[in-house]
Image: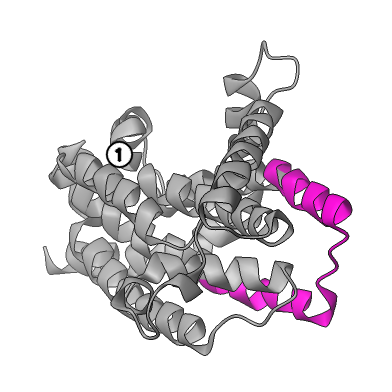
Amino acid sequence: MTRSSDTQQIDQQNDLLAALLAYDRWSFLAWQDIKTKYRRSKIGPFWITLSMAIFCVTLGSVYSQLFKADISELLPFLSIGFVAWSFIAGSLGEMPNLFIDNALYIKEMRINLLIIHLRALARGLIILGHNLLIVLGVYVYFSIWPGWFGLLVLPGFILVLLNLASIGIALSVIGVRFRDLSQITQNLLQVGFFITPIFWFPRLLPEGSWVVALNPLAHFVDLVRSPLLGHSPQLASWVGATVTLFASAILAAVLYRAKSGRIAFWV
């Protein structure tokens, strides 16, 4: 029994490295997911981009009048923020049911569970790549060039991606045991959309307001949006996202090590 337990712990420790090295597998599966979902569509995932562009233009036109804001400032802020939010919320929203949706694979074969995670994140990245056309359109229409600050989007996005991976692992392990977590997550994301500065400016709140200071989603969006608008992200965003990553990574590692061997029996 002890030898079996030790072997399982070693396998769990090697799961992450093995999953990363199997990039050809999960990237191919992610691309196939997109192709299958939009098989009979003429423009495929660009439907998501089109609907998002219409949403941003409509909401930006309305809220620029409500807030008495210049549309040339609000619409780029809203559009780029909404593109970032869609990736973040989409990635987190599917995590509680991730193992449940892949129950057939988990039950029928020995599979590295982290490959399922990377497949889901890669699928989100592909959709994000399509939605970046909105950012390009904003640049062209409003003659925006982020300059050297734009390079900060690389470390910022990597930090956000690591957070999504860590939080996602924790959500998926808990979600397969407690099925209500999916509904709880969806409700929290809906609330998060309104308390995260996506279609309203943070400056509208009192300085140091908890709505932004204690909102990790606001930090994630800021790390992506600010560099693309030619600004440096707030220091609080770097600190908040780093602290969140530290806490979520520990939680994910503990949960995965303790419960991954039972997931096949729970799905």
State the image coordinates of residue 13 (x, y, percent, origin top left).
37, 70
Q: Residue at x 35, y 41 (%)?
A: 98
As displayed, is residue 267 above or below residue 20? above
Q: Is residue 135 visible?
A: yes
Does 140 appear in magenta? yes
Q: In which quarter of the image is residue 213?
A: bottom left
Does 153 appear in magenta? yes
As displayed, is residue 120 above or below residue 78? above
Query: Could you tell me what secondary structure mostly forms the magenta stretch?
Result: helix
Helix, strand or loop for disc 1: loop
Question: Disc 1 marks which residue?
Answer: 97
Q: Is residue 28 left or right of residue 4?
A: right
Q: Which residue is drawn at 70% across and 30% down?
A: 46
Give, as a three-letter code, the residue at label 1. Asn
Image quarter of the N terminus: bottom left
Q: What stretch is highlighted in magenta?
A: 130-159
